[in-house]
Image (spheres, grey):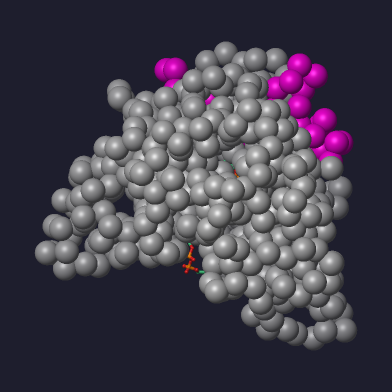
Amino acid sequence: MTLRLVDRARSWDTRTALAAPEGTFTYRQLLEASAAMARTLLDGEPDLREGRVCFLVPPGWEYVRTQWGIWRAGGVAVPLGVSHPPAELAYVLDDAEPDAVVVHPALEERIAGEVRARGIRMIRVGGPHGPELVGARSAPHLPELSLERRAMMLYTSGTTGRPKGVVTTHGNIEAQVEALVEAWGWQADDRILLHLPLHHVHGIVNVLTCALWSGAVCEVLPRFDAEAVWEVLARGDLSLYMAVPTIYRRLIEAWEGADPERRRRWSEGARACRLMVSGSAALPVPTLERWQEITGQRLLERYGMTEIGMGLSNPLRGERRPGHVGRPLPGVELRLVDEDGSPVREGVPGEIQVRGPTVFREYWRRSDATAEAFTADGWFRTGDRAVVEEGDYRILGRNSVDILKTGGEKVSALEIEDALRLHPAVRDCAVVGVPDPDWGERVCAAVVLREEVPTAEPEAFRAFLKERLAPYKVPKDVRLVDDLPRNAMGKVQKPRVRHLFD
Ligand code: MCA
Ligand code: AMP
């Protein structure tokens, strides 16, 4: 069968799909250009048969037609982080073992060497060397795709080792989109702004795919910039906006720094939106309240995870309780359990577990990790804790101190520690998340030097990590310490390490 996303796009036809940095494009153009991309990828074969295709393409038209092209050719779309250094990209190439890598000239230098060294086919999009868009109608039949087929793989940090590929099927993505379209009342006359990174569910599913499923317009900014976002909001023609708490805080700061006339203009435009959503990290109540004062918008907070899409949401209509993330979305089975795995009563904290069609299929080539992540009867263990209060869920935090959230990005303390230990001056280290008004949590590292190294510049460790890890994983603060605080069993006491940065 044809993907419903694609089928629906046929009915949207000449409506605008994307207002992108490269121009404005209709659904028909997207169908044609993605068919051309699919044909290029297929290169005469009938079906990519779930072969992975990594793509390093900035947000915009080229990104979307590549993503759709991979799907329509029967491949698994693996978007790469546009801010990531070559070493992080190389990790994904080795893990995903793609059949092809699609690159944009603006980012080619970052990955071309890694692709060539591995003998992987490289396809350029955008710029003068991109695949031709013409002749798409004469494309051979594109493969039939069942909902069970793997569609996408997003890398996520965990408590063990390096990031894992979270594999979702077409059925999973459809279920994730349908839940949100229903809950948040998406319509063809909606218009949303997108500046979130496109290697995460938040940007890909909640914003981009929901918009294109609905026949709405997705307006893409190449990157987040507070003034640019305010200027778009000021136009008053957006109906939806979605971001992480750090971004709302930055928008508030920009508003407070603006002159009265701009403030008035910005606030007035923002009032016209029908819905603004916050998620990916806890929304501080003062941010919710200040945003409402400035824009008249009461943010709808929701809870999600790469492995499950969105799980809980405050209501579109009805009371949105500050500090709470609402109730399970349509089609999502969700429960709280105690340490023995038994469901808890209202008012008693427990781990969030999720089941149903939105839940991912597997961690790529990690059957042990996949098996461990599910209970015997198929519930996914999120590792997040919550409590139900008068029917609404409140997130309490994570089971593991080693999973941090900074500016909406999940990072693993252990992964950063492993990378730091590769530095020749480091004898030992501990990475922690320190509560921070801007980032939610600020990544900080305590480092013990080797005896033979008398001293070192903390900035040198940051530079060392920047070459190896995504920029948001690099600690903002590195302190040299004589020793790490440990308990009687010799285990590092992370809460005490955290206090070093107070
Ligand atoms: C950038 N930096 C960061 C972060 N982003 N550091 C920590 N945490 C971050 N999130 C680094 C930059 O590389 C730079 O490093 C320094 O911080 C300052 O950069 P700045 O220009 O201020 O940052 P920015 O480029 O404006 O980015 C901030 C941001 C961005 C706009 C808040 O991080 C962002 O778009 N976050 C949203 C992430 C997101 O969509 N998460 C969803 C995943 P240096 O100074 O060293 O060069 S969660 C998800 O998908 C689930 C399903 C869900 O529930 O939504
Ligand atoms: P990721 O693994 O990057 O998809 O991030 C998912 C994690 O973000 C969840 O497991 C939660 O810990 C966190 N998260 C998402 N939404 C919220 C929210 N509204 N409040 C608190 N934490 C959240």
x%, y% of residue 194?
A: 42, 52
- Residue 330 lies in magenta, yes or no? no
- Residue 388 lies in magenta, yes or no? yes
Question: In this rendering, would 110 be left or right of 202?
Answer: right
Q: Quadrant of residue 102?
A: bottom right
The residue sitting at 72% across, 73% down in the picture is 112
Picture quarter with the C terminus: bottom right
x%, y% of residue 240?
A: 33, 42
x%, y% of residue 258?
A: 21, 67
Q: Is residue 156 visible?
A: no
- Segment colored magenta: 366-393
Question: In this rendering, would 353 be left or right of 58?
Answer: right
The residue sitting at 76% across, 27% down in the picture is 374
Picture quarter with the N terminus: top right
Q: Is residue 390 above or below residue 467?
A: above
Q: Is residue 24 above or below residue 388?
A: below
The residue sitting at 82% across, 59% down in the picture is 94
Q: Is residue 367 above or below residue 158?
A: above
x%, y% of residue 345?
A: 57, 13
Along the line of sight, the residue nearer the viewer: 7 or 113? 7
Quadrant of the rendered image holding ligand 2? top right
